[in-house]
Image: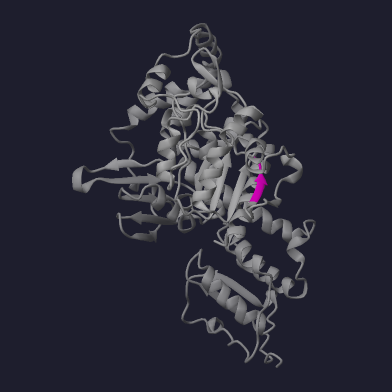
């Protein structure tokens, strides 16, 4: 059935808010199926009862709108962009896709590039919101509440509110921005109107402690001003309490670096030995692992006494896997790092934070995945106070394969993700070129599918900001593919 012929007068679509994607989607469907041209539509936010153009045509009987499925996800992200022309642009893209279904795959097309740029800007703004929101406490006891002020470039509050709910479930908080606010009372999330900066508190009792901490963790020997300003642009500084320290820290970096080098000790810090004595169980070393474990908890307990290779002698403790014992996906890294060795938990150091953030961006629930390492003890070289990561050799990886095998037997995942070459060696029993095999799925003889990608620590080792951002996007794409493979 052909769409009804309509009056050529312009249609006005008034959305409920800047982020009313459902309203835009409904209006776009009606207008597209009635063959309304993009230039005949005026898009806006708000309502006007006196405007006769607000009445939209009904969907013609039997008409169906078919567009590539991935467009909806792209459009939903780009919809949060602050470009006032985004409503019309997305409608234009929708019209083009009806006759050009492969449009999104044409990287050279100007409209496709514009859509990708809008998505990237929204994702980057979301990343900055995750990193630069600073809560300040108001009230005490039952009246305790945390308030933060943030100035996003795009309309991302609703998009990111769930992130803060997951991170700060146990406290009552409010994030204020110029166009919207998010409030969590411990049970319910509410999105409200925007606010002014004066509505947020200036400081709280913990701010002096935070500034002292920030000043003491500053490493002058690793200072790269351009890289720092790339990751922490100056426009965010006015809302970051620690930003007031940055000019003086930069100015004194050279002298501080010389003093730091002069004070470096020649022996490892004694607290590592104390922690090791605390965590290692007082029992005879066992060369062979306990094979009586029937659950992950029992296997974790058995691993505390592992002596299958010499790495246990210098490590603080065994760092076993963590996550639900019925996880659909198991992520396997290389080995625990310095922070993991001290905490006894995997993926809690800098690479773990990158991993968590990208999983969140990809929509993979970190609480529903199991994370572990090919080698369960930290291998390092002592350099003064620091313990420098040293790559496990093939013998050490082979010695630890028994633990990985038992973890997989008990969890029975749908997919294992090899994060880097050492993990791939452990899972597949042979060395592979990760750069060539990245993104591929290899099926083992036992039927387990293994997805190949890099370790997130690789992103941290990239110095050039543009290259680092590009690699992060590639890893994010890999994690989205993992989500697709496990069907969640």
Is most of the magenta stretch helix, strand or loop? strand
Q: Name the quadrant containing residue 399.
A: top right
Measured along the vertical axis of the image, is residue 235 above or below residue 269?
Answer: below
Magenta-tinted stretch: 450-454
- Report whether 359 appears left or right of 166: right
- Report whether 314 appears left or right of 270: right
Nearest the eye: 229 or 460: 460
Nearest the eye: 337 or 475: 337
Q: How many marks?
A: 0
Residue at 65 percent of width and 65 percent of height: 70
Nearest the eye: 453 or 373: 373
- Report whether 463 appears left or right of 217: right
Measured along the vertical axis of the image, is residue 168 above or below residue 9?
Answer: above
Q: Position of residue 77 (x, y in %)?
A: 58, 59
Q: Position of residue 298 (x, y in %)?
A: 40, 42
Q: Position of residue 241 (x, y in %)?
A: 41, 33
Measured along the vertical axis of the image, is residue 154 above or below residue 128?
Answer: below
Residue 50 appears in view: yes
Q: Quadrant of the C terminus?
A: bottom right
Q: Quadrant of the N terminus?
A: bottom right
Residue at 34 percent of width and 55 percent of height: 184
Residue 356 appears in view: no
**What sort of colour scheme is used for the picture?**
one colour
Residue at 19 percent of width and 44 percent of height: 141
Q: Position of residue 100 (x, y in %)?
A: 77, 71
Does residue 268 show up magenta in the picture?
A: no
Residue at 50 percent of width and 11 percent of height: 260
């Amino acid at each position: 059935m052909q769409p009804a012929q309509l009056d050529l007068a312009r249609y006005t679509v008034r959305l409920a808010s800047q982020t009313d994607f459902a309203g835009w989607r409904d209006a776009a469907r009606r207008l597209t199926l009635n063959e309304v041209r993009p230039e005949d539509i005026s898009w806006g936010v708000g309502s006007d009862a006196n405007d006769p153009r607000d009445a939209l045509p009904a969907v013609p009987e039997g008409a169906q709108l078919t567009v590539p499925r991935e467009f909806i996800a792209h459009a939903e992200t780009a919809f949060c962009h602050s470009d006032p022309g985004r409503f019309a642009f997305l409608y234009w893209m929708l019209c083009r896709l009806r006759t050009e279904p492969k449009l999104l795959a044409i990287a050279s097309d100007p409209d496709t590039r514009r859509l990708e740029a809008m998505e990237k800007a929204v994702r980057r703004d979301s990343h900055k919101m995750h990193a630069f929101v600073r809560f300040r406490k108001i009230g005490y006891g039952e009246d305790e509440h945390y308030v933060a002020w943030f100035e996003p470039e795009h309309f991302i509050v609703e998009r990111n509110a769930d992130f803060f709910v997951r991170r700060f479930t146990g406290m009552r908080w409010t994030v204020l921005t110029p166009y919207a606010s998010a409030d969590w009372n411990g049970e319910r999330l509410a999105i409200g109107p925007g606010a002014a900066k004066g509505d947020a508190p200036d400081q709280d009792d913990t701010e002096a402690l935070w500034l002292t901490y920030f000043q003491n963790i500053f490493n002058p020997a690793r200072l790269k001003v351009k890289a720092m300003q790339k990751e922490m642009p100056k426009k965010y500084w006015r809302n970051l309490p620690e930003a007031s320290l940055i000019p003086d820290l930069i100015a004194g970096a050279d002298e501080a670096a010389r003093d730091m080098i002069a004070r470096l000790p020649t022996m490892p810090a004694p607290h590592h030995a104390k922690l090791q004595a605390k965590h290692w169980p007082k029992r005879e070393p066992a060369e062979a692992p306990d094979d009586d474990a029937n659950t992950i908890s029992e296997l974790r307990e058995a691993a505390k006494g592992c002596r299958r290779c010499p790495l246990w002698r210098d490590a603080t403790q065994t760092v076993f896997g963590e996550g639900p014992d019925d996880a659909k996906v198991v992520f396997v890294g290389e080995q625990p790092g310095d922070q993991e060795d001290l905490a006894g938990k995997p993926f809690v150091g800098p690479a773990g934070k990158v991993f968590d953030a990208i999983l969140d961006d990809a929509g993979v629930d970190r609480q529903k995945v199991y994370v572990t390492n090919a080698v369960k003890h930290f291998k390092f070289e002592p350099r003064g106070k620091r313990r420098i990561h040293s790559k496990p050799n093939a013998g050490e990886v082979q010695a630890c394969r028994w633990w990985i095998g038992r973890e997989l037997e008990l969890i029975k995942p749908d997919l294992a993700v090899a994060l880097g070459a050492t993990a791939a060696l452990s899972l597949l029993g042979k060395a592979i070129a990760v750069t060539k095999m990245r993104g591929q799925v290899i099926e083992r003889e036992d039927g387990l599918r293994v997805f190949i990608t890099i370790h997130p620590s690789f992103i941290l080792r990239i110095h050039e900001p543009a290259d680092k951002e590009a690699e992060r996007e590639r890893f994010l794409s890999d994690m989205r593919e993992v989500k697709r493979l496990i069907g969640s």
